[in-house]
Amino acid sequence: MKNKLIANYYTALMLLLLYSCTNNEQNPLLPKAIKIPVIDTLHGKINIDNYAWLTNKDSPEVMKYLKTENQYTDNVMHSAKKLQDELYGEIIGKIKETDLSTPYIFNGFWYYERTEKNKGYPIYCRKEKTLEAKEEIILDVNKMAEGYEYYSIDGWQISPNNEIIAYYQDTIGEMEAYDVYFKSLKTGKLYKDKLANVQGESVVWANDSKILYYVLQDSSNRGYKVFKHELNSGKKDQLIFHEKDSRFNVWMEKSKSGKYIFIASFSSTSSEYWFLNADRPNDDFQLINSREENHLYYKISHNGSKFYIVTNKNAPNFKIVETGISEPQSAHWTDFIPHRVNVHISKFELFKDYLTFFERENGLDKIRIIDLTKETDYYIDFDEPIYNVYSTFLNPEFNTNKLRYVYTSMITPKTIYEYNMETREKSALKQIEIPNYNKNGYVTERLWAKAQDGTAIPISIVYKKGITQNGKNPLLITGYGAYGGTRNNTINFSVERLNLLERGFIYADAHVRGSSYLGEHWYEQGKLLNKKNTFTDFIACTEYLIGEGYTSKGNVVAYGKSAGGLLMGVIANMRPDLYKAVILDYPFIDVVNTMLDSTLTYTTQEYEEWGNPNNKKHFDYMFSYSPYDNIKKQNYPSMLFITGLNDAQVGYWNAAKMVAKLREHKTDNNQLLLKTSILSGHRGKPSRYAQYEESVFIQAFILKTFNIEQ
């Protein structure tokens, strides 16, 4: 049973100032939150939370505290303003502000986006049939954002007849639910129809371009209901599907062939799909296979009379199966690409005559192509020691022999290739232009650290050529290790990262357990009751880099975002001596309290990731590492916390509460800063220029910590 006693809560708010200002030589006006004890008892354990009041977003006192912390952060970072301007200028000098994306063809139109100098948002355009045709602007987000403090477009879908665009709009600050508007591409006028509280990227058109389906979110931002909507009819939307199990999240998608619409309901360990012929929107959805414990199947693709499916049924690293549409149940599935112990299948693209998929072995992806007409296969290989390759959103056409993919690495700028699957020839369509950049001036390596239990942990690093292993180099190390994601974007080329590399930093990414970097077992060894492997792996990687002379104690900065912020919070508590600074970006660090609140976004859906604290075994384990609950009276590194008031994924109070508690307990005079964006959510501000500003703020904090002024 859980009991709460709020000690003199209202009296405290009436009689005490929200914060006090304490003085020391380094921090003349240091914010200090008041303590209002909340006493919890669960599983026989009594816990006192003095800063639970900070979770009340609507409280004027909370807003005052957050703004006071922001002002303090601004004051501390004021001396680095010139440095921030220099860093920002260096980024702008390395990008092409006015640019054009690589056009792709879909349903007879070429689609692309443009950016223009001094404009923060993209302009989405298309041309009919040929690239020589007249440009049609379908969405100018710069104009749409006028008058809003926050504005974001999170995707759009074109109707099958090419005449209507449905787009997802957020003007609140990424609350993870969107308003959907419909615009005629013939007249430019909006339809009266508006869908509210819709899950992003969940609108799917039937082929008549009149009927569409969408996913509604509940109060915790979980997709849970599918509705059928008839555009411009005035009819009441019809409920099609209702997911009542709070562990499951619902979304929708359409096959590349355009023939079928799918409803997907997922937990982190189980899934269920339903399908409908897109030419017959008045029919009922049919079940593919009933959900089973520990059975995930996804990426249903259609070709002819068959579905192709990725599944982990008797295949921990996943396999691809095929089944007839008339008998789609798992009893009728046959292996198309069998399971292999050391090869992880992550995603695939199905075309009319080809199936292409990504195999990850030893942490690196290869592209395998199967000619369905000739029943032959081959690989596209890559020669750098560390790289990332992906094809998301680049291949919407079904009847084509051309595959587009993106290739990038820590030293190779993003390059889009078009590969002819028939002739096996490739051409580079576009590479991001970086003025005065020479990849030969940098070195990238793959290293292996030994974990506490003897497991080899991969590390990807990059640095400027000429740097030696003398133990004197500043080093930035990042990590994540959650949800089974590979998070390969950290090994992508980064213009922002060049700012630090040019100043002598080594950048390292620790591929700790909890991801699926080395396969599904890598994920299983870093979740639930194995979660601490993620933390000790990261510490082992840091110690390895120190031991090999890449850096030394006092020269290491650690950075993590979201679940990576959890990792940062734990290592700051466990081994503060290793790090000069730790940066927690939108961090998940109040683990137990968050997972006890089932009203929050994703809480019940993530019981299978972190555990359910209502289970004593899970509670004890989570409590033993939860950063907020394990703050000690000890010296901590310099620390920067960044969060967003409207973050629906990870509440801002995670950072706010931990900073308040750290101020109470830490015994050092190192900087402790909290920066809260009042208008944004988990992904920060949507404007590209605002995102650059956020990057240089973090970089300036790092450089200031090292007393580097330029």
Image (cartoon, helix red, strand yellow):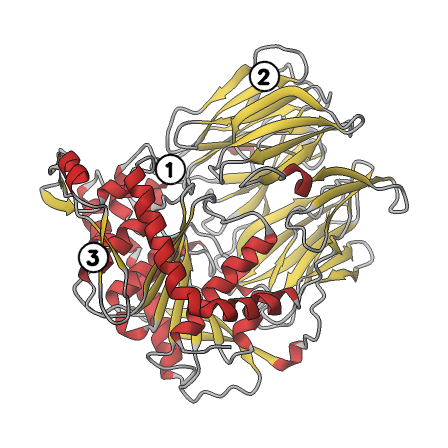
Mark toward the start of the polypeptide (2 vs 1): 2
Q: Residue at x 50, y 21 (%)?
A: 241
Label 2 residue SS: loop
Residue 242: x, y in percent?
46, 21
Task: Say which mark, if any, is on residue 630.
Answer: 3
Q: Residue at x 66, y 28 (%)?
A: 260
Q: Is residue 105 above or below residue 490?
A: above
Q: Nearer the viewer, residue 365 or 217?
A: 217
Label 3 residue SS: helix
Mark 2: which amino acid? Asp
Q: Are circles 2 and 3 on residues that touch, CB within 8 Å?
A: no
Mark 1: which amino acid? Gln
Q: Are circles 2 and 1 on residues that touch, CB within 8 Å?
A: no
Label 1 residue SS: helix
- Look at mark 1 in the image and give the residue it sits on: 605
Task: Say which mark, if any, is on residue 515.
Answer: none
Would residue 32 appear left or right of 287 to someone viewing this image?
left
Q: Residue furthest right?
A: 132
Mark 2 or 1, which is nearer the eye?
1
Q: Is residue 186 above or below residue 540?
A: above
Q: Nearer the viewer, residue 577 or 356?
A: 577
Would residue 385 appear left or right of 225 to someone viewing this image?
right
The residues tagged by marks 1 and 3 sit, at their Cα atoms, a distance apart of 25 Å
